[in-house]
Amino acid sequence: MRLGPVPAALVLGAAALAALLAQRLAAVAVIAGVLLAVSLRAPASRRRPYLVGILGSGLGVLVLSPFLTAQGFHVLWSGPTVPVLGKLDVTEEELSIAALNALRLVAVALAFTVYALLVDHDRLVSAAGFARRSALGVALATRLVPSLERDGVGFAEAVRGRGVPVEGVRGHARLVSPLVAGSLERATNLAEAMEVRGFGRPGHTKAPRPPWTRLDRAAAVAAGVLVLAAALWL
């Protein structure tokens, strides 16, 4: 049984907020682990770019943060003295803070990944009757990421088919211009389609929405409890 789009968005937002509020490393690690397990339900070809970027960013925060801060007294590694930065020491406190911040970044990014790949944005927009335009803007912006991903893969294959390698920064820079042009063309087509369908005019029709199930209600309550627990105890 799957959650509806609104309860799912509430749970994901609560998980991201809880990861930012929690002060215990184990609690943030559990949140990140659960979100990672949920994100693995998405197709491998779609989730791979997200997970590679997320894990790379988290690892970068974990590795670089201890060298850019000076905090704590329990030295684990004493390095050389670098101009401007000073003595490169890694303390237990610095490593703990770096791990917490890295896990926070990973948890928030995984929550967005699950939202982008697994939540039905059409149903989410139709359910947000009180903020229809705002919800539509968020949904369209979210869809831009997988659309750019698919366009990038197609352009890269076309360039390789012409015997031009797509490697390194210079090779991928060749894709920027067609990606921008394609995005502008897609935006123009979308605006024309919305205008033809009467978007923004008074009065509109909407498809009937299925009622919330017990699982949906329980998920909404659990989202609030999770944020409260993160703020007070975790």
Image (cartoon, grey):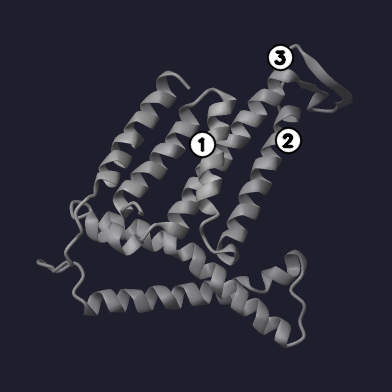
Q: Position of residue 154 (x, y in %)?
A: 60, 78
Q: Is residue 36 above or below residue 46?
A: above
Q: Position of residue 116 (x, y in %)?
A: 45, 57
Residue placed under numbered mark 2 in the picture: 64
Quadrant housing residue 205: bottom left
The Cα–Cα distance between marks 2 and 3, rounded to whole angstroms, is 16 Å
Q: Amino acid at mark 1?
A: Ile
Residue 232 badge: none
Q: Is residue 197 above or below residue 73?
A: below
In the image, which is nearer the foreground, mark 1 or mark 2? 1
Q: Can you name the residue that lies furthest to the right here?
A: 80
Looking at the rendered structure, the secondary structure element under dot 3 is loop
Q: Residues within 10 Å of mark 3 (few under 14, many from 20)?
A: few
Which residue is drawn at the image coordinates 54% and 34% (left, top)?
Answer: 30
Which residue is drawn at the image coordinates 18% and 51% (left, top)?
Answer: 130
Q: Amino acid at mark 2?
A: Leu
Looking at the rendered structure, the secondary structure element under dot 1 is helix
Quadrant housing residue 43: bottom right
Q: 64 left or right of 208?
A: right
Q: Position of residue 117 (x, y in %)?
A: 47, 59
Residue 31 badge: 1
Residue placed under numbered mark 3 in the picture: 72
> Of marks 3 and 1, which one's residue comes earlier in the chain?
1
The Cα–Cα distance between marks 1 and 2, rounded to whole angstroms, is 23 Å
Question: Which of the pair 83/233 is nearer the observer?
Answer: 233
Question: Which of the pair 60/120 is nearer the observer?
Answer: 120
Q: Amino acid at mark 3?
A: Gly
Q: Can you name the residue that lies furthest to the bottom here?
A: 162
Q: 193 left or right of 151?
A: left
Question: Which of the pair 131/50 is nearer the observer?
Answer: 50
